[in-house]
Image (cartoon, rainbow, N blue to C red):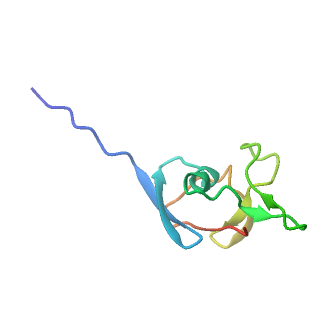
Amino acid sequence: MSASKSTPPEVVTLRVNGRVVTVPVGTTVAAALGAEGVPVSRVDLGGRPRGPVCGMGVCFECRATVDGVPDVLTCLAPCREGQEVVTDA
């Protein structure tokens, strides 16, 4: 008798380099960057592009500034409502 209602997926909205991005709850910042077509989060001292490699916080290649904190490992950082992410690349 009761119709099952599907609930919309829970999402969070953040900003990536000033652009509004909405992702499902539980998405890492690195995954949000990739989904938005931002595969590079920084450049090394030689100017070479760097981005997530290991996805588990070992390589340190995915660092970005998150909520004003530099060098956050984006592969380990969950997206949060209102978060500001700035890449160096």
Q: Is residue 86 left or right of residue 44?
A: left
Q: Residue at x 55, y 66 (%)?
A: 83
Q: Residue at x 49, y 61 (%)?
A: 21
Task: Examine the rendered structure and indicate whether residue 8 appears above or below residue 79.
Answer: above
Task: Give the camera-side residue of 36 and 78.
Answer: 36
In x, y percent, where is residue 19? 52, 69
Q: Is residue 86 left or right of residue 50?
A: left
Q: Is residue 1 left or right of residue 81?
A: left
Task: Give the camera-side residue of 60 and 18.
Answer: 18
In the picture as drawn, the residue positioned furthest to the top comes out as: 1
In x, y percent, where is residue 37? 59, 56
Task: Specify the quadrant of the image occupied by residue 8.
Answer: top left
Q: Quadrant of the N terminus?
A: top left
Task: Examine the rendered structure and indicate whether residue 3 appears above or below residue 79.
Answer: above
In the picture as drawn, the residue positioned furthest to the left comes out as: 1
In the picture as drawn, the residue positioned furthest to the right comes out as: 46
Q: Residue at x 22, y 37 (%)?
A: 5
In x, y percent, where is residue 55? 71, 44
Q: How many numbered marks have been drawn onto this rendered protein structure?
A: 0
Q: Quadrant of the C terminus?
A: bottom right
Q: Residue at x 27, y 38 (%)?
A: 6
